[in-house]
């Protein structure tokens, strides 16, 4: 991609592509429309990753933003090996910026997802790697760290547009106090906050950078807590 490329928004063909893909989720159809995917999904996604990566460095200096498939841009191919649903393609665009020493999804980060009619923007850690479950539980049980994360989550979700995600277990893990003030957090296997809504008008313009960055910035305290405490 030429260095002078700038993110000027996604376009209506981006969302039409995902609508059409949902109705024609076959390899034959995708190959026939690959050029539309490359031009209207991948190109603006790469531009978004490059520019958002620079903006995020102002709040998360070691953020990783790589405008390539399987790096910051999730591959569109579904892993169907263990799924009853054998449709080959995802019907959304996923973009992830992460910070930390582990492989991509083992670190906290900032996530953006677009499909034919909606947007999801999130911050945190979607699924904790198995070896981080104990450090996570110890941290949310700790008098200082646990109090800190409870305050962070209360403040962030004071904005009722933001929802808390990551609850997974039905029982408190063995060895932890079932009467703990952070009982709910002990039932998590991931910890993230997300906004979900219809496609905003900003998505079609460069303004979408500031729109997304504003939400990512609201999620910064959670990101920092995970980065600093879950190791």
Image: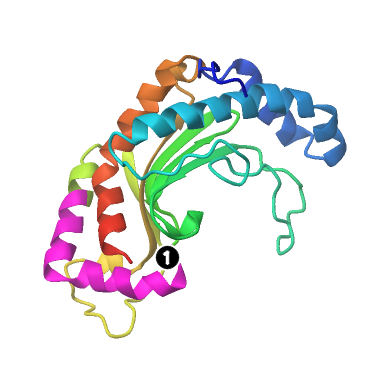
Point out the image quarter for the N terminus.
Answer: top right
Q: For residue 111, which quarter of the picture?
A: top left
Q: Residue at x 15, y 57 (%)?
A: 148
Q: Nearer the viewer, residue 55 or 116?
A: 55
Q: Position of residue 21 (x, y in %)?
A: 73, 33
Q: Position of residue 94 (x, y in %)?
A: 55, 40
Residue 104, position in %: x, y?
49, 54
Residue to which mark 1 is pinned:
168
Q: Give the residue furthest to the bottom.
A: 175
Nearer to me, 44 or 80: 44
Left or right of residue 110, residue 37 in this image: right
Can residue 161 be seen from the camera position used here? no
Q: Residues within 10 Å of mark 1 (few under 14, many from 20)?
A: few
Residue at 40% across / 47% down in the picture? 109
Quarter of the image where the C terminus is located: bottom left
Dot 1: what SS?
loop
Q: Position of residue 77 (x, y in %)?
A: 71, 46
Question: Toward the viewer: 221 or 84?
Answer: 221
Name above or below for residue 2 compared with residue 34: above
Q: Which residues are magenta?
A: 128-152
Q: What is the tally of numbered marks visible in this picture?
A: 1
Which is more toward the observer, 201 or 61? 61
Q: Main secondary structure of the magenta part?
A: helix
- Residue 67's place in the image compared with 127, above or below, is above
In this rendering, does residue 200 appear at all? yes
The part of the image, by quadrant, that contains residue 156 is top left
Q: Would residue 142 be counted in the magenta stretch?
A: yes
166 left or right of 28 in image: left
Please give the name of the residue rendered at 49% of the width and 24% of the height, measured from the top-left corner.
199
Name the residue rendered at 38%, 55% in the picture. Answer: 100
Above or below, comparing residue 169 to residue 113 in the picture: below
């Amino acid at each position: 991609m030429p260095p002078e490329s700038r993110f000027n928004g996604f376009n209506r063909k981006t969302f039409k592509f995902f609508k059409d893909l949902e109705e024609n989720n076959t390899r034959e159809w995708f190959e026939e429309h690959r050029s539309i995917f490359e031009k209207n999904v991948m190109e603006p996604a790469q531009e978004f990753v490059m520019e958002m990566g620079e903006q995020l460095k102002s709040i998360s200096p070691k953020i990783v933003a790589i405008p390539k498939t399987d790096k910051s841009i999730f591959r569109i191919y579904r892993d169907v090996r263990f799924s009853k649903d054998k449709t080959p393609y995802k019907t959304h665009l996923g973009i992830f910026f992460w910070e930390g020493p582990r492989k991509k999804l083992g670190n906290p980060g900032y996530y953006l997802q677009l499909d034919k009619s909606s947007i999801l923007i999130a911050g945190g850690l979607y699924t904790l790697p198995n070896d981080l479950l104990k450090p996570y539980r110890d941290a949310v049980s700790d008098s200082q760290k646990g109090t800190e994360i409870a305050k962070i989550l209360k403040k962030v979700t004071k904005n009722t547009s933001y929802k808390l995600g990551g609850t997974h277990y039905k029982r408190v893990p063995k060895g932890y106090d079932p009467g703990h003030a952070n009982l709910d957090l002990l039932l998590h296997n991931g910890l993230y906050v997300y906004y979900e809504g219809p496609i905003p008008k900003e998505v079609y313009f460069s303004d979408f950078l500031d729109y997304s960055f504003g939400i990512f910035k609201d999620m910064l305290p959670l990101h920092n807590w995970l980065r600093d405490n879950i190791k």
